[in-house]
Amino acid sequence: MKIAIRAARAALTAVASVAAVTAPFAAPSAWAAPRIKDVADFEGVRENQLVGYGLVVGLAGTGDSLRNSPFTRQSLTAMLERLGVNAAAGNLNTRNVAAVMVTANLPPFASQGSRIDVTVSALGDARSLAGGQLLVTPLMGADQQIYAVAQGPLAIGGFAASGQSGSSVTRGVPTAGRIASGALVEREIPFDFAGQPEIRLALRNPDFTTAQRVAAVINASVGAEAARAVNPGTVALRRPQEFAGDMVALVGRIENLEVEVDSPARIVIDESSGIVVMGENVRVSTVAIAQGNLTISVQEDPFVSQPAPFSRGETVVVPSTGINVEEEEGGLVMVPGGVPLRQLVNGLNALGVSPRDMIAILQALKAAGAIQAEIEVM
């Protein structure tokens, strides 16, 4: 058994060799700032979730067991009765039907007659939906109103196969699939966006500096005090009286404006997978780091102890334990202040430090107060 306890390692030569390590990832000379439409959402321009319950038919014996899925039996009986078939007194015993839940996202400003994609997921004990056909399924919103109707053949990305001996193989998810353009929009969501005198922009990453920059960029383009930062996550946009156009024209003019986004100094650590993600504003203060590896090796070498000839003793196994301690010499190395954390991490990568050790180093630096950043552990 070997227990390895590793402490932090850093060297000035490693930090100096970062340039060669990070050369393939160097930023281009002409860096394009993100657009307003990439960092903010416009009020009223959003999707709406739809959901429905339906039946998939045409399955090759891989559907629901009607004995174990009473809702499938009830739905099948009700559907046949609506079509004029009296199946209430019959003994339905088919596995070619499956009850499914159908979900979709209604895009903003979707017009009546347009098509949207739908996702179909098995609700009962169906083994596979491959080859199935979704029957007419109304899709409702949160207000219990029908906004679309779905129907069509399913496209399944996975498959399942089994033999009589009990062996089986499954790849992907055969009980879920999609229907491209499988739903027709029947009801529009009314929203007079063009006639709005004022809308709000919701920043996806709220920040005081970013909100002020967005408002300043819009005002410089429009030529009036049209935008103002209400809070770190909201920028109010009012259409000026002298602007020749409606709100649609105003948004179309400002959504492609580039704005420099300010991000907080934050380090995100996922200890389960050893992933470290950091922002560019993370800085390291002047700090001294000690290096050294301590390895404790415990080795068990059991041997057999036999009694003397013609004696009444018993043969036994006697354990023999050997412990060896090795420690590498290490000293304190001074890291100057103002060094970007990415250079320190890349230097540790050049020395062969594993992600687990890197996480321990970052947490130790944070405990010492040498990192001006917020560490978030997932």
Image (tube, rainbow, N blue to C red):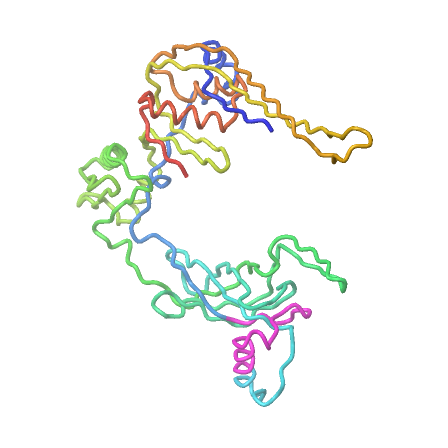
Residue 229, compared with residue 346, is above or below; it is: below
Give the percent coordinates (x, y) of residue 120. Answer: 53, 62
Q: In this view, which residue lies farthest toward the right?
A: 310
- Magenta range: 54-79
Residue 237: x and y in percent read 23, 44
Please tell me in which quadrant of the rendered image residue 252 appears: top left
Q: Is residue 311 left or right of residue 324?
A: right
Q: Position of residue 317 (x, y in %)?
A: 70, 33
Quadrant including the N terminus: top right
The residue positioned 31% from the left and 47% from the top of the image is 42
**Residue at horizontal 38%, vertical 30%?**
267
Decide if residue 107 is on the left or right side of residue 236. Answer: right
In-front residue for pair 272/210: 272
Instruction: Judge by depth and name the residue closer to the eye, 335 or 60.
Output: 335
* Residue at image point 38% right, 58% down: 48
Q: Looking at this rendering, what residue extends furthest in the front direction?
A: 311
Res. 260 in view:
no
Question: 59 above or below 336?
Answer: below
Q: Which of the image's four quarters has the C terminus? A: top left
Q: Is residue 170 magenta?
A: no
Q: Is residue 64 visible from the viewing direction of this image?
A: yes
Residue 62 % position (x, y): 65, 68
Give the image quarter of residue 296. Answer: top right
- Residue at x-position 53% and y-position 67%: 123
Q: Is residue 95 above or below residue 90?
A: above
